[in-house]
Image (tube, rainbow, N blue to C red):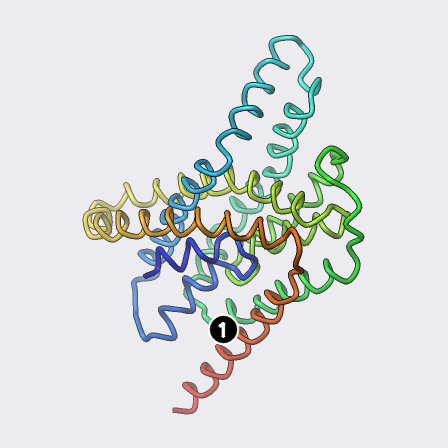
Amino acid sequence: MLGIVQGLTEFIPISSSAHLVLVPWLLGWTFDKQTAFVFGVLVQWGTLVAVFAYFWKDVWLIGRAVVDGLARGEPLGSFEARLGWWVVLATIPAVVFGLLLKDQVEATFSAPVAAASFLFVTAAILFAAERFGKRLRDLRQFSTGDALIIGFAQALALFPGISRSGATIGAGMLRHLDRPAAARFSFLMSIPALLGAGVVALVDLFENAALLSSLALPLVAGFLASAVSGYLCIRWFLGYLQRRSLVVFAVYCVVFGALCLVVALARSYA
C-alpha cells in the first residue's frame, strides 16, 4: 500500500514524503522512526526505476552528449549536454542542505503535524506558479539561473510536506517555463535526487543488520508497487499538464493538510 502511495504521489505535486508519514498515522500504523525513514527513502528507488523507464531515451541522449562534449573539449556544445549539466547544477543545493540538515529532516518524518503543515507551503507554491508564471518558455530557452533557482526549490522539499515535484515545477513556472517543460526538468532532476537519498539510506540500512533483515520483504513489495504506479503516474501527469492547471493539486494539499491538523487536534483532546 505504501509503495502505491509513493508511486502515485512522487510525481504529482502533493508530496510523497508527507503521504508516507500521514497515511500510516491516519490509519494508526506505528513504525520505529528509523525504520520508517529508511523504508520511505529506499522505496523511492521504485519511482527512480519508473523515471528511467519513461525517460530512458532522454537519459541516454543526455549522457552521451555530456561524454561527447567532454571528449571534444566542448562540455556545453549541445542542448542535451547543457541540459545534463543543468541537472547536475540543480542537484547541488539539495545535496548540501541534505548533508547539513540530515538529523532535522529525519526527525520530521516522525512529526505528522509538521508534515501536514508543510502541505500548505506546497499549496502556496502551486497557487503562485499558476498566478504569476507566464508559461512563455520551453527547455530550449533554459538558463543556468533557472537551474540554480529550481535547485534551491528542490532543497526546500527535503522536509515532508513540501512536494519535490511541486516545488521544482512551481519554481520552473515562476521562471516562466511552460508546464510540460517545468515538469520534464523536474522529473530529470529526480534521478540524481532519488539516487543520492537512497544511497544515504542504504548506508544506514547496512549498518543495522537486524533492520536489513526485517525490511527485506517489505522493501521488495514497496519497490515493485512504487515502480509500476510511478510509471503510470508519470505518463498520466505529463498528458494532464498539456491542458490543465496545478490548482487542483494546491486545493488538495490545503484540504488534506487541514484534515490532518483537525485529526491531530481531535486526538490531542481524546
Picture quadrant where residue 124 is located? bottom right
Residue at horizontal 28%, vertical 42%? 207
**Vertical relation: 126 (above or below) 263:** above
Position of residue 84 relative to residue 35, above or below, is: above
Q: Secondary structure at mark 1?
A: helix
- Residue lying at 54% horizontally and 73% vertically, measured from the top left: 257
In front of the other: 256 or 262: 256
Q: Quadrant of the N terminus?
A: bottom left
Position of residue 214 relative to residue 18, above or below, is: above
At a point 28% along the width and 49% down the height, the residue shown is 219
Q: Residue at x 45, y 57 (%)?
A: 8
Q: Quarter of the image holding residue 69?
A: top right
Q: Position of residue 103 (x, y in %)?
A: 46, 54
Image location of residue 180, percent across then percent down: 65, 46
For badge 1, the amino acid type reads Val
Q: Is residue 3 above or below residue 27?
A: above
Which residue is denoted by mark 1 in the rendering? Answer: 113
Q: Position of residue 141 (x, y in %)?
A: 77, 35
Is 26 displayed left or right of 265 in the figure?
left
- Position of 203 with respect to 11 (left or right) is left
Image quarter of residue 58: top right
Location of residue 203 in the rendering, given as x and y in whole percent from the top left corner: 35, 40
Q: Which image quarter is the C terminus in?
A: bottom left
Q: How many marks?
A: 1
